[in-house]
Structures are given as structure tokens and as C-alpha cells.
């Protein structure tokens, strides 16, 4: 039987915040706890938690708003609090999911105490700089991220394309930890004709769906171009663009696409019903480390059009269970979307294949792999701890990072 671990997870975002990182971390925490491990969570206090008292396995810190991301925060640097906490009760291993001030203070405290660290590369922050007019700091940010992750025992990434990109940029000890999908929640059986009727559609009409954060880095101009091309190419079809999600670009997109239906943020079964009530899923983002929504759309039985990277590259076989375009080739992307509607039988077959594939992509295997990575770094950590006890030292030989 595997050793029961005390795992500390450090993150600047967590449920009920809505994003792929929070969703993934919630799944990892729940999976480890179901296997008997103790999971300690360290994160910023969320806006709805005024007066909330932290438990033994939860430490909250102050946070600062992230510009352009209302509702999300950077965690305050808390190195001395973490040192005191971990000197009293030492974790076996840390999983640092975000690289902000909180993650950095956890990394420094762990190195001071000789605690093993695994890091996760969840967000391509270095790719967000150009859409926000800060391209001049891309190199500096990449340098920091490389420095940060190279100080962990292992860095886990969700896709093969992400692994290759980071290794090309000098990141070391990169391992793959993919993502899963709840294929019972996201299921074609949740299709709702009453919801479609509220959108003004019959059973034979086509819903072109997009789910995600409405922000600059998501390349949503291509969503608009793709839908307009579909309308031009297939004037015989009744098409409706439905957008699920919220973000800083929503007001602008509502002005640019007045005929689209904006459903705002949806959760749980309501989100699954919105997915299943669509037909064609358009995902034009080029900045994803994975893209959980791709798997959710496939599990819901949608025909997905995406760029050939991250989750789409791993899970879509072009022409079989979706359609792909080379990254950045907007003309090919639009052609792929139009191809989906050229033939009703093609669309039906692609959707069936999408569901069939996604139904085999559960979270169980992902949790198993995560658990193995955590165990793999612990023996070296225990040996290091034994050496320190003999030597009477409580500080890492390397000192500060």
C-alpha cells in the first residue's frame, strides 16, 4: 500500500472561482483526499470569505486584484508565516500551481526547510503580454518563469505541445500530467430543446457555441470571423452564435456581435446543458496550456474546431472527431469550421466520434499519475531530512534560491 502523504497545494485561484486552473486543482485535491492523503490548501482569501476562519488544512492570505482579471487575485507574499507553519507541521511535498508572490514565497520557504517541491505550469502568462500591450516584458517574464520552475523537482504540464515549448525555452525536468473530463456531467443526453427554443431555434437549426473567458488573449475576433463565414457559406442553414462565459471583453463583443446570445457564467448542470444544446464548438484560442473546455465540448457530443495544439492536438483527429487548423492559420481555421456544415452526415458522425473519445478520458488516470509524481519526489526528500537531523541544521545547504 502506498504511503499516505501530507501534500500542501499552493495556488492563487481555487473554486468557486471559474477557470481551468481552479477546476483542475479542485479535481486533484478531491482525488487525493479520496485516496486517504491529507491535502493542505494555501490560497488568497476570496471576496465572499469576509470573516472566514481558516481550518487546519486551509491557510488564507491577503490578495491583490490582478489588472484585467476582476475577481482573481495575486496572493500576498507569506514566507515567514509559511516557515512557522511548516516548522510546526512539515508537509511531505508541496505542489505550487501558480508563480505569483504567494507561490514564490512558498518556493523559498520550502527550499529553506528542504521540503520537496513539484510545480505546475497552468497558465501561459508570457503569451498574455502582447494582447495587453506589454510585449516588451515577454522575455523578462519568460526568464522569471524558467527560473521559478527550474527550482522545483519536477514541473507538470498538461499537454505535449506545452512540454515541447518549455523544453525548447530551457525549462528542465518537465513531465506530462494531462486533464480529464466528467463524462457523466458533460453528456449529450443533457440536450434541452426548451433551452434551444428560448434561443429562437428549432431542433434542426445549428447552434455555434463558444465557452470560455471573454478576454483579449482568447483571440475572439476569429470567433466573429468564423461565424460570419459560416453564415455566408451556408445561407440555407439557420445558425445562432451562443457565447457562454464572462470577462472584460464582454461589453465590446456584445456591440460587435449584436445578434449573438450571451449567456454569462454557467456552472455545473446548467453549464452541461448549455454545452449539450449546441452543435458546433468554435475555440480559436492560441494561448492555452490545455483548454479544459475542449474536452467538455467533446464529451457533450459537439463537433469542435480548434487550432492543432494543447488539448485539441491530443484529443482531436482531424476529420474524425473534430477539425484542426495549424496554429495561426486563420483561413484554414475558418475553412475547417465551414467544412463541418457541408454535409449533415459528416456533422453527425464527427459528433458521435467526439463523444465516444471523450467518454474514455476520465479523471481517475490523471489522479493516479499525479499521486505517482508526488510519491516519486518524497524518498529523496526524506533522505535529505535525515541528513539535516544528523547535522543539526534546519536550513537548506543552498540557502536562498
Image: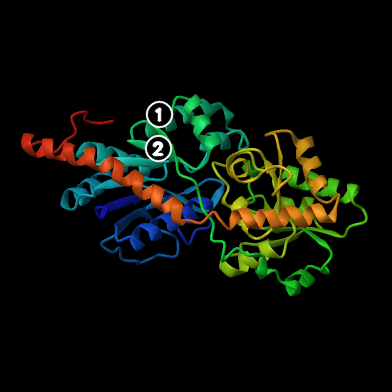
As helix, strand or loop, the secondary structure at mark 2 comes to strand
Residue 82 versus residue 77: which sits nearer the camera? 82
Q: Residues within 10 Å of mark 2 (few under 14, many from 20)?
A: many
Please state which of residues 103 and 275 is positioned toward the viewer in this rendering.
275
> Which of 346/195 is in front?
346
Q: Are marks 1 and 2 in contact (CB under 8 Å)?
A: yes
Say above or below: 269 vs 75: below
Q: Position of residue 187 (x, y in %)?
A: 62, 65
Q: Is residue 302 visible?
A: no
Quadrant for the N terminus in the image = bottom left
Q: At x 78% / y 54%, what residue is drawn?
A: 347
Point 79% across, 36% down: residue: 331
Quarter of the rendering occupied by the C terminus: top left
Q: Position of residue 139 (x, y in %)?
A: 51, 25
Residue that numbered label 1 is attached to: 172
Question: Is residue 289 toward the left or the right of residue 383 in the image?
Answer: right
Q: Is residue 146 left or right of residue 252?
A: left
Image mark for residue 318: none
**Residue at the spot 92% in from the left edge and 53% down from the top edge:** 235
Whether residue 382 can be seen here: yes
Helix, strand or loop under label 1? loop
Residue at point 74%, 47% (across, down): 223
Are there few (<14), some (14-19), or many (20+) residues within 10 Å of tag 1? some
Residue under label 2: 155
**Image height of 321 relative to 184, above or below:** above
Amino acid at each position: 500500500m502506498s504511503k499516505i502523504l501530507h501534500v500542501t497545494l499552493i495556488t492563487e485561484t481555487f473554486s468557486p472561482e471559474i477557470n481551468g486552473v481552479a477546476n483542475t486543482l479542485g479535481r486533484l485535491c478531491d482525488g487525493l483526499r479520496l485516496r486517504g492523503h491529507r491535502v493542505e490548501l494555501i490560497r488568497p482569501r476570496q471576496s465572499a470569505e469576509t470573516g472566514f476562519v481558516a481550518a487546519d488544512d486551509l491557510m488564507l492570505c491577503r490578495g491583490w486584484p490582478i489588472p484585467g482579471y476582476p475577481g482573481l487575485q495575486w496572493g500576498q507574499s507569506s514566507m515567514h508565516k509559511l516557515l512557522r507553519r511548516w516548522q510546526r507541521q512539515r508537509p511531505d511535498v508541496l505542489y505550487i500551481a501558480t508563480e505569483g508572490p504567494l507561490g514564490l514565497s512558498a518556493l523559498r520557504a520550502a527550499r529553506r526547510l528542504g521540503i520537496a517541491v513539484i510545480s505546475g505550469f497552468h497558465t501561459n502568462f508570457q503569451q498574455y503580454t502582447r494582447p495587453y500591450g506589454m510585449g516588451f516584458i515577454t522575455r523578462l517574464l519568460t526568464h522569471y518563469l524558467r527560473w521559478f520552475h527550474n527550482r522545483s523537482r519536477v514541473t507538470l504540464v498538461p499537454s505535449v505541445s506545452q512540454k515541447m515549448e518549455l523544453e525548447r525555452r530551457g525549462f528542465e525536468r518537465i513531465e506530462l500530467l494531462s486533464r480529464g473530463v466528467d463524462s457523466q456531467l458533460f453528456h449529450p443526453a443533457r440536450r434541452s430543446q426548451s433551452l434551444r427554443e428560448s434561443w429562437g431555434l428549432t431542433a434542426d437549426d445549428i447552434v455555434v457555441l463558444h465557452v470560455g473567458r471573454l478576454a483579449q488573449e482568447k483571440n475572439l475576433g476569429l470567433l466573429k470571423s468564423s461565424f460570419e463565414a459560416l453564415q455566408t457559406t451556408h445561407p440555407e442553414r439557420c445558425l445562432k452564435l451562443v457565447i457562454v462565459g464572462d470577462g472584460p471583453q464582454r461589453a465590446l463583443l456584445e456591440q460587435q456581435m449584436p445578434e449573438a446570445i450571451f449567456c454569462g457564467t454557467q456552472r455545473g448542470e446548467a453549464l452541461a446543458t448549455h454545452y449539450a444544446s449546441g452543435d458546433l464548438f468554435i475555440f480559436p484560442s492560441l494561448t492555452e496550456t490545455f483548454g479544459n473546455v475542449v474536452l467538455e465540448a467533446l464529451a457533450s457530443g459537439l463537433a469542435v474546431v480548434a487550432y492543432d495544439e494543447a488539448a485539441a492536438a491530443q484529443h482531436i483527429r482531424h476529420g474524425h472527431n473534430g477539425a484542426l487548423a495549424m496554429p495561426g492559420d486563420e483561413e484554414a481555421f475558418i475553412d475547417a469550421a465551414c467544412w463541418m456544415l457541408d454535409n449533415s452526415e459528416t456533422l453527425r458522425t464527427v459528433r458521435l466520434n467526439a463523444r465516444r473519445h471523450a467518454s474514455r478520458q476520465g479523471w481517475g488516470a490523471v489522479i493516479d499519475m499525479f499521486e505517482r509524481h508526488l510519491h516519486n519526489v518524497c524518498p529523496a526528500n526524506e533522505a535529505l531530512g535525515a541528513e539535516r537531523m544528523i547535522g543539526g541544521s534546519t536550513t537548506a545547504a543552498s540557502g536562498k534560491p
